[in-house]
Structures are given as C-alpha cells and as structure tokens.
Image (cartoon, rainbow, N blue to C red):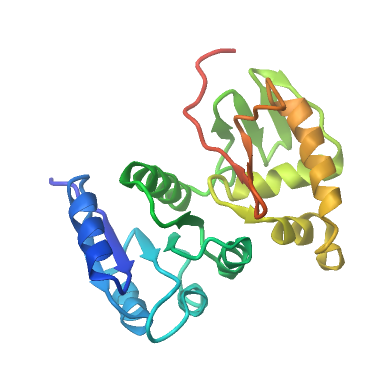
C-alpha cells in the first residue's frame, strides 16, 4: 500500500509566499492546500483534515490570532505562525491563543521544515502520556514520576518536577512565561516571571551537561521556553 501524503494548509494572503511554500513543501513530500483569507483558511482546515497549518497573522479579513482561536474550538492540530510581526507581544499573543510555534519573516525553508517535523511528531504522540518521554540522554516517565539523565536518576523538588512535566507534555512547543507560571504556580502568579527564571536555572543545573549552553531547556528570548526534542542517546 502506498503511504498517504501528509497535508498542510497554508493560510497566507501573499501569493509569492504561497508559491514559495507550495513548491518548497511539495519537494519534501507534502501536499499543500492554500487560503488567502482567514475565513477561507478555517474552512480549508476543516475540509482537508491536514497534519499541520501554516498561518500568517496579517490577513485581509481577520487577525491571525482570531483564526487560531476559531480552529482551537474544534481541533488541536499543529499551527505554525509565519509572520512579519517580530514584536515579542505578537508572538506571545499567538502562542497563548494556541499556536505551536512562530517563525518571523523572512525565514529559511530548512528551519521551517525542521519546525514542521517537530510539530507533527508532537501531535502524533503526546509525549510521556503512554510511556517514558525521551530526548537525547534525558528520560522523563510521568507515570513513575522518574527523571533520568544518561541513565542516572535525578531527584527534583515538587515544583521543579511540575515545571518539567508541563514542558514534557508540550515538548517541541514554545510555552510562554505566562502559560508556564499559570500551569505550575496557578493563575495568580501570571506576572511573577522571576520565579520561572529561578526554577528554570535550577532545572538546567540538574539536567544539562552545560547549563550555560543548554541542549534540552531552550530559551525563546522574551517569550518563554521550549523543551527541545532530540534523537534518543545511545549512551548510558
């Protein structure tokens, strides 16, 4: 049997960018359906049942954040933002609305493809929910509440573990400071970003070979953090 071709819906009003995405993604095995407006994009997303949506924020009929919210009412499929809006608040608004990732124009096809692969992997297998989550030499078993680095168990405080577990459940996805604070500490702590910096530093000290050059717990400057997904280490 032939394998189904993965489908991507591109919601973008610039015909030149749509052409670039259509030809570039097609050469890497994707079938692309296009929409030039937000409303058309929402319709295409429902009709085509894609593996992923690529969305521009500056659409002629409605804001991209409104498109994200509309799709999130009925679907959890991955959404990657491609936008000329580079301000941190625009990224935060899109990610908090439910986007999985954000790339600023101009962008490279190679980086976009890498983000697409991560988002589709994350969507296909919710990490840690059916067994241990593994990235590089880091293993997190949410059922056993066990954390291993290169085969050695690492002991975390309850808050450190809670922070790591939220990142694991959203591995590969950018999580904003506010989202993490609310998930770990509760809704009244949404502005206490210094808590987050302190505990992220503690986690890096325990989990990273070099906390100053982390390979797992990555900072998205001014926006939040991402748990990097890497091939499983063969060591340990």
Looking at this view, is 227 or 153 the one in front? Answer: 227
- Hey, which quadrant is residue 210 in on the image? top right
How far across and down, in percent of the image, does residue 6 sit?
A: 26, 54
Q: Which residue shows up at 84% across the image and 57% down it? A: 185
Asked whether, in this view, residue 233 is left or right of residue 169, the answer is: left
Which quadrant would the N terminus be assigned to in this image?
top left
Looking at this view, is 108 or 236 the one in front? Answer: 108
> Can residue 111 be seen at all in this image of the molecule?
yes
Residue 102 to residue 60: above or below:
above
Asked whether, in this view, residue 171 is left or right of residue 213, the answer is: left
Residue 31 to residue 2: above or below:
below
Residue 55 to residue 173: above or below:
below
Q: How many marks?
A: 0
Looking at this view, is 64 or 202 the one in front? Answer: 64
Which residue is outermost to the top?
236
Which residue is outermost to the left?
1
How far across and down, in percent of the image, does residue 134 sit?
A: 56, 32
> Can residue 5 be seen at all in this image of the molecule?
no
Q: Which residue shows up at 59% across the image and 12% down it? A: 236
Asked whether, in this view, residue 83 is left or right of residue 40, the answer is: right
Q: Which residue shows up at 86% across the image and 67% down it? A: 188
Q: Which residue shows up at 37% across the image and 48% down it? A: 112
How far across and down, in percent of the image, does residue 155 sit?
A: 81, 28
Asked whether, in this view, residue 69 is left or right of residue 9, the answer is: right
- Hey, which quadrant is residue 97 in on the image? bottom right
């Amino acid at each position: 049997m032939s394998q189904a071709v993965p489908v991507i819906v591109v919601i973008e009003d610039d015909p030149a960018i749509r052409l670039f995405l259509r030809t570039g993604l097609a050469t890497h095995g994707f079938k692309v359906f296009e929409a030039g407006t937000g409303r058309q994009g929402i319709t295409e997303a429902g009709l085509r049942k894609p593996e992923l949506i690529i969305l521009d924020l500056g659409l002629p009929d409605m804001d991209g954040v409104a498109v994200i919210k509309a799709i999130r009412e009925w679907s959890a499929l991955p959404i990657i933002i491609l936008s000329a809006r580079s301000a941190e608040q625009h990224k935060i608004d899109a990610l908090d609305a439910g986007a999985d990732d954000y790339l600023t124009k101009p962008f490279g096809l190679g980086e976009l493809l890498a983000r697409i692969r991560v988002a589709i992997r994350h969507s296909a297998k919710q990490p840690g929910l059916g067994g241990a989550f593994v990235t590089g030499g880091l293993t997190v078993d949410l059922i056993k509440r066990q954390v291993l680095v290169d085969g050695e168990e690492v002991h975390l405080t309850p808050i450190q573990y809670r922070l790591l577990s939220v990142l694991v459940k959203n591995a590969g996805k950018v999580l904003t400071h506010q989202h993490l604070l609310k998930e770990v500490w509760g809704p009244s702590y949404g502005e206490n970003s210094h808590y987050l910096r302190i505990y992220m530093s503690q986690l890096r000290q325990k989990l990273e070979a070099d906390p100053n050059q982390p390979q797992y717990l990555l900072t998205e400057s001014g926006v939040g953090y991402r748990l990097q997904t890497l091939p499983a280490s063969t060591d340990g």
